[in-house]
Image: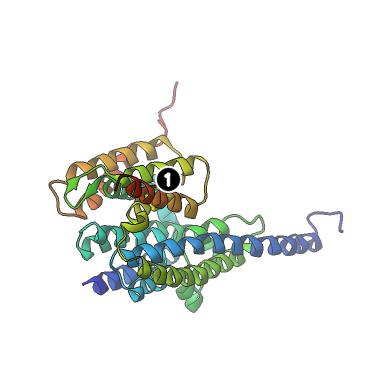
Amino acid sequence: MPADPTSPGSRASGVRSERRQVLFDSLGVGVATGAYGLSFGAISVASGFSVWQACALSLLVFTGASQFALVGVVTAGGSPLSGAATALMLGTRNTLYGLRLASLLGLRGGERLIGAQLVIDESTAMALKPKERANARLAFFATGLAVFVLWNLATFIGALAGQAVGDPRTYGLDAAVPAAFLALLWPRLSTLRARVTGVLAGGLALTLVPVARPGLPIIAAAGIAFLASLKDDEPTREAG
Amino acid sequence: MTWAAIIVTAVGCYLLKLAGLSMPERVLDHPMVRRVADLIPVALLSALVAVQAFSSGQSLTIDARLAGVGAGLVALLCRAPFLVVVAVAAVTTALLRLAIG
């Protein structure tokens, strides 16, 4: 082993040894995320979507929260259009991920067109993790592709299972939907601002349920996100 | 109509992803942009949890689903993985319905 950590040899071996870890972790994330594709497939078909519609959502939309949102809003009686609006608003966070990834990955042309579909929570988190910048691309593509393949496979299997279930109330699948949203929400509640936003948004949506058409209370709740963003993070006023 | 919504969502979500990779990174420098982007998922997901747990159609209801979501919350507090949380919620609701008929 070269003693000088700044020598090119040691740097290359650092990249190599990290590379194996990156591939291993990416596959692990793929399996874990893919598994919840099972619940997406089962829930969407039990909610009245066809097997092909569930598979099309996973292939073409490929961003879990948006897919669950479209299915959830339509199942609750909302119009497909308000379901799509909710799904798109949830999809805006991927734009921010892309902004953060752009300079890190440096994707050009066709690479960028393919890479764009893989910009999701998991691939972003994994791409930002490696210490060696050279491994960021590997982490991004390995995680994105592992999740893509397993998520779609699991959706198909889950959808077939959902077909056998029939009524979503059997086996409590109607409770699985809000529980899935809660699990997606949970890691985002780390700050006080986020918690207050969550409580106000939930409260506003419930207040609107009896008076607004299904689907609209969810869209209205997005307004809380804008209001809660107005206040600055920390007071920037100087003490003296 | 459902297919139309699927296509709109698919095209829109792809363009949102592509836009991020293609826009100048300095857009992120604005702290307000960051905050809105962080809080939109929080607001929408909270609203979805509330509406799906407490309502059916246009009426507010309390039923076996709430017990399921509560059990899912306990699973989250125990740091259970996603699939376990979802399964716990579903099984709890199904068993409760079986018990009270």
Locate the N terminus of chain A by quadrant. bottom right
The residue sitting at the bottom extreme is A110
Image-quadrant location for residue A59: bottom left
The residue that label 1 is drawn on is B72
Residue A78 x, y percent position in the rendering: 20, 59
Left or right for B37, reference B76: left
Chain letter of mark 1 equals: B
Residue A11 x, y percent position in the rendering: 76, 60
| A60 in relation to A69, above or below | below
Task: Give the residue drawn at x 26%, y 60%.
Answer: A75
| A34 in relation to A187, above or below | below
Image-quadrant location for residue A142: bottom right
Regarding residue A188, the answer to whether it shows in the image is yes
Between residue A195 and residue A149, name the one nearer to us: A149
Between residue B60 and residue B16, name the one nearer to us: B60
Left or right for A146, reference A44: right
Label 1 sits on a secondary structure element that is: helix
